[in-house]
Amino acid sequence: MPHRSLAFAAAFAIAAAVAAPAAANQDKALTAAIAGPQRAADHVARDAARHPSETLVFWGVKPSQTIIEISPGSGYWTEILAPYAKATGGTYVAGVADLANPKLSEGARKGRANFEAKYADAAKFGNVSYVGFGAVSGPLGAPASADMVITARNIHNWMWQPGMLDKAMADFHAVLKPGGVLAVEEHRADPTRPQVPDARDGYVATDAVIAAAQKAGFKLAARSEINANPKDTKDHPFGVWTLPPSRQSSKSGEAADPAFDRAKYDAIGESDRMTLRFVKQ
């Protein structure tokens, strides 16, 4: 017993010694950006489901990087990554609606304008850069110029557009430096059930994402369960959009159904998601 106690004490001391420098080397700028007052309250409220610190560390976000985020939506990651880039000498680029596309809808044009206005305060967000992204868009930047491309909850939207997933992956590969990272977060389909055609329910098979990335020349470097949610049964009446934060209660284009019983779906929380890190070889 005394020998075991000594061994345990020695092991604890070694662990403590290793943990101390790790804690000291934490990215304080990233911590500050996540905790910063520039973040909207509704985004902060989602942190328990989206795990921003753990996810960004897993993807390998570091100071001074050039990071391109594809279709950033309401700006959940923008509010973290743009100030982080500003503080660390990096560059944050938002891949948004492609204004050069003659078929771009007026709604998409307005959405881009609203996004740019929302994040125009350079004192808060630095100088956010923009590049068009879409079915007929050009390069995301100069070849081999970016350190990371992030796509969060977008791939399902490309599955029903012929050729779009392959185009997106090729665009990502072209703009990344050798060794650059493609960071993926996506609603994860049930592997025991067939993929819903065109991912119309919002869920994508992990194998399909990996295959598309590998086809473009990426190597799967790691996968994480950071954003897993075992409560998500993935069989909801309005697909993934039944769950928070969308909380859809009727067919698209129809008014919300006040009689829809939300309790079951709100109790599930946000979707079960794959979190993947690919590397350009």
Image (cartoon, helix red, strand yellow):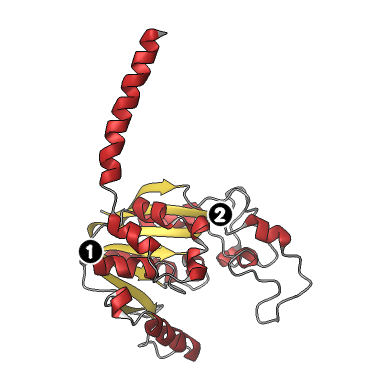
On the image, the x and y values in percent for residue 207 come to 48, 52
| Camera-side residue of 205 and 61 | 61
The residue that disc 1 covers is: 88
Question: Vertically, is 25 above or below 111?
Answer: above
The residue that disc 2 covers is: 272
Question: Residue at coordinates 51% horizontally, 56% vertically from top-left?
Answer: 48
Question: Vertically, is 98 above or below 1?
Answer: below
Mark 2, secondary structure of its residue: loop
Instruction: Say which of marks 1 and 2 sits in front.
Output: 1
Question: Residue at coordinates 52% horizontally, 63% vertically from top-left?
Answer: 45
Question: Vertically, is 199 above or below 24?
Answer: below
On the image, the x and y values in percent for residue 55 come to 40, 54
| Camera-side residue of 97 and 22 | 22
Mark 1, secondary structure of its residue: helix
Count the marks.
2
Please state which amino acid type lies under the numbered disc 1: Thr
Task: Classify residue 124 by image quadrant.
Answer: bottom left
On the image, the x and y values in percent for residue 172 come to 32, 66
Question: Residue at coordinates 45% horizontally, 57% vertically from top-left?
Answer: 209
* Disc 2 packing (10 Å; few <14; some 14–19; many ≥20): many
Q: Residue furthest right?
A: 259
N-terminal of the two: label 1 or label 2?
1
* Disc 1 packing (10 Å; few <14; some 14–19; many ≥20): some
Q: Is residue 138 visible?
A: no
Asked whether the residues under the numbered discs 1 and 2 touch, taking CB atoms below 8 Å apart as contact, a structural biologist would say no
On the image, the x and y values in percent for residue 8 come to 37, 19
The Cα atoms of the two marked residues, 1 and 2, are separated by 32 Å
Tell me if 29 is positioned left or right of 163 in this view.
left
Question: Residue at coordinates 74% horizontally, 75% vertically from top-left?
Answer: 257
Please state which amino acid type lies under the numbered disc 2: Asp
